[in-house]
Image: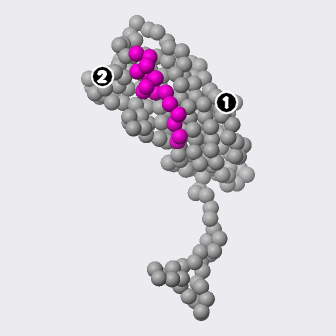
C-alpha cells in the first residue's frame, strides 16, 4: 500500500509530484506457525453457563440465582496480548470479573491448546466474594491450536467442565483476596460455548 505524506495543509511535494512512502499493511506479529503468518480471530465470544450443582455440607446462604447473576453470561473477548506462541483474549466486566481465553498457536509447555479463566474477587461482598477453579484447559483433541484451526470458521464449540468445577465462595472475606480458600460456598460444573469471529 502506498502512503502519502502530509505536512498539515496538504501533501508533501517532491519534484512537483506527491511524495510517497513505501509501506505494507500487515497484521500484528502473531503466531509463529510452520506454514507462515496466519490471520487470528478478531474476537472470541464465550457463553458461560453453570451446570449441575454439587451439594456439600458447606453450601452457605447464597442462592442459585445469586450464582447465576454473578457468573453466567455471554462475554465477547478481544485480543490484548498477541504473541508468537499465543493470543490472549480478555474482558473485565462492570462487576469486576475478569474473563480470559488464552489460545495457543500450537501446544503450550503443558501440552494444551487453550485455557479459559473466569476470576472474581470482592472481599466486601455479602454474598459471593470470590471465584475459585473457574478455569478450563483444552487439549488438542478438544480444540485445535490457532495454527491449525480452520480460518474464518465461526462454528460454535461446546465444552463441559467434566472434572473441573467452579467454586463460588461466600463473603465477605476476612483476609482479602489472597486468603486460603474457605469451605463455605457453592460448587458447580459448568459449560462453555466458544465462537471465534474473524
Label 1, label 2: how many angstroms apart (C-alpha)?
38 Å
Hey, which quadrant is residue 70 in on the image? top left
Q: Residue at x 56, y 34 (%)?
A: 46
| Residue at the limit of the structure toward the left, as seen here | 174
- In depth, the one of 168 and 106 nearer the eye is 168
Q: Is residue 60 left or right of residue 140?
A: left
Across and down, in percent, residue 90 comes to 49, 42
Q: Nearer the viewer, mark 1 or mark 2?
A: 2
**Pointer 2 residue:** 126
Do we see residue 180 in this rendering?
A: no
Q: Is residue 74 magenta?
A: yes
- In depth, the one of 182 and 119 nearer the eye is 119
Q: Residue at x 58, y 28 (%)?
A: 192
Display colour scheme: one colour
Across and down, in percent, residue 153 comes to 70, 42
Q: Is residue 55 magenta?
A: no
**Pointer 1 residue:** 142
Do we see residue 81 in this rendering?
A: yes
Identify the element where label 2 is drawn: loop
Looking at the picture, does residue 95 appear above or below residue 66? below
Q: Residue at x 59, y 56 (%)?
A: 29
The disc, 1 or 2, on the residue closer to the chain's N-terminal end is 2
Across and down, in percent, residue 97 comes to 41, 34
Across and down, in percent, residue 165 comes to 51, 20
| Residue at the limit of the structure toward the bottom, as seen here | 15
Image quarter (top left, top right, bottom left or bottom right) of the N terminus: bottom right
Mark 2 is surrounded, within 10 Å at the Cα level, by few (under 14), some (14 to 19) or many (20 or more) other residues, namely: few
Range drawn in magenta: 63-77
Q: Residue at x 38, y 26 (%)?
A: 130
Looking at the picture, does residue 36 appear above or below residue 143? below
Amino acid at each position: 500500500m502506498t502512503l502519502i505524506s502530509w505536512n498539515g495543509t496538504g501533501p508533501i511535494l517532491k519534484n512537483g509530484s506527491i511524495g510517497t512512502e513505501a509501506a505494507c499493511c500487515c497484521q500484528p506479529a502473531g503466531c509463529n506457525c510452520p506454514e507462515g503468518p496466519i490471520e487470528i480471530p478478531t474476537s472470541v465470544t464465550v457463553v458461560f453457563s453453570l451446570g449441575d450443582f454439587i451439594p456439600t455440607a458447606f453450601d452457605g446462604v447464597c442462592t442459585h440465582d445469586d450464582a447465576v447473576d454473578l457468573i453466567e453470561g455471554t462475554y465477547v473477548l478481544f485480543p490484548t496480548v498477541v504473541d508468537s506462541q499465543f493470543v490472549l483474549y480478555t474482558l473485565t466486566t462492570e462487576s469486576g470479573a475478569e474473563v480470559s481465553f488464552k489460545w495457543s498457536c500450537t501446544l503450550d509447555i503443558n501440552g494444551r491448546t487453550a485455557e479459559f479463566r473466569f476470576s472474581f474477587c470482592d472481599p466486601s461482598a455479602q454474598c459471593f466474594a470470590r471465584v475459585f477453579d473457574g478455569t478450563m484447559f483444552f487439549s488438542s483433541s478438544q480444540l485445535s491450536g490457532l495454527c491449525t484451526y480452520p480460518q474464518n470458521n465461526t462454528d460454535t464449540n461446546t465444552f463441559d467442565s467434566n472434572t473441573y468445577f467452579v467454586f463460588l465462595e461466600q463473603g465477605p472475606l476476612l483476609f482479602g483476596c489472597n486468603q486460603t480458600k474457605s469451605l463455605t460456598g457453592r460448587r458447580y460444573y459448568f459449560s462453555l460455548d466458544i465462537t471465534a469471529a474473524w
